[in-house]
Amino acid sequence: MLTIGVDVGGTSVRAAVADEHGQILRMHRVPTPKTGPELNTAIADTVRVLTDQYPIDGVGLAVAGFVSEDRRVVRFAPHLPWRHVAVADELSHRLGLPVVLEHDANAAAVAEQRFGAAVGARVAALVAIGTGIGGALVIDGEVFRGAFGVAPELGHLRLVPGGRECPCGKSGCWERYCSGTALATTAAELTGTGSTSLPAEPSGLDVARAADAGDEVAVRAWDDLARWLGEGLALVADVYDPEVVVISGGVSDSAHLFLDKARDHYAAAVTGSGHRPLARVRVAHHGDPAAMIGAAAMARQHVLTGPKVP
């Protein structure tokens, strides 16, 4: 059985044909349109490019946004034009194939639990660190979504009361201290406190490159991110007690700059430090394609089990 996983992002729509082992056979990408109808058409056209080449049994869509409990409706996606749109039903009608929706972090977590860094783990958490933080939890092979389909919103745990303002409307959220955006903010705040080649308003990529070159301020910015990652992981462990935590997202590409220190902070901050097993903290195996691989796997299970969504 072959299925297609589609990662619907604010910049591009990427679709991939994947087999039952999570191996990608072919990919296709198009820019993301600005309106809902255009986006639906772009997804359908992208999928058809692949269905013309392979016999496909189902389609899974990974979306950065709130998805209804039955996996049919996108309630809200901050970087996409959908607002309470029955995307799965509309695309299924257009394509003549079963279509299921999933939050992109959940899809990536499924990919890692079935085919990647969390294989065999009974309780696995995923922390996707990019522009912000996305989170997911898989228990006994099933995605945990909460009562209304939006859990776990880890990026907006409040770590610093009265801290940096967040676009979500709160302040002090975890992602304001531990993300690519936060890294750049921290580096800008540290400019003037040490020797640096960074511009006044650096990007996260600037900070990564400078740290690799030994830049003092950039290294300190990564140390700050490592501290907050450890603090957040301690909260995740206190609440969920996972066996494995997978770190994914663009920031994970620079894991050599922060992950060991983050593990140390986590081990020191977790409740019962020194007297309990610690979750293994690993970098994602599948990287950027993980959401497509996971969405394809969930489409496969949706086809095999009928209306029940994994």
Image (cartoon, helix red, strand yellow):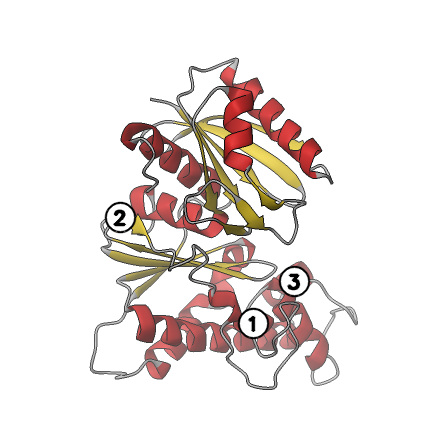
Q: Secondary structure at mark 1?
A: helix
Q: Nearer the viewer, residue 271 or 149?
A: 149
Quadrant of the drawing holding the N terminus: top left
Query: What residue did someone put label 3 on?
Result: 204
Residue 289 visible in the current orientation: no
- The residue that disc 2 covers is 141
Mark number for residue 222?
A: 1
Q: Nearer the viewer, mark 2 or mark 3?
A: 2
Q: Earlier in the sequence, mark 3 or mark 1?
A: 3
Q: Tell which circle, 1 or 2, labels the residue nearer the N-terminal end.
A: 2
How would you rate the neighbour count of disc 2 (Cα within 10 Å): few for under 14, some for 14-19, many for 20 or more? some
Give whichever of discs 2 and 3 has the lower sequence position: 2
User: Marks 1 and 2, Cα distance to the nearest angstrom?
Assistant: 33 Å
Question: Label 3 is placed on what type of residue?
Answer: Gly
Quarter of the picture containing the C terminus is top left
Hey, what amino acid is under mark 1? Answer: Trp
Specify few, some or many for label 1: CA neighbours under 10 Å numbering under 14, 14-19, or 20 or more: many
Tags 1 and 2 in contact by the CB under 8 Å rule?
Answer: no
Three-letter code for the amino acid on which mark 2 is drawn: Gly
Nearer-the-camera pick, 308 or 13? 308
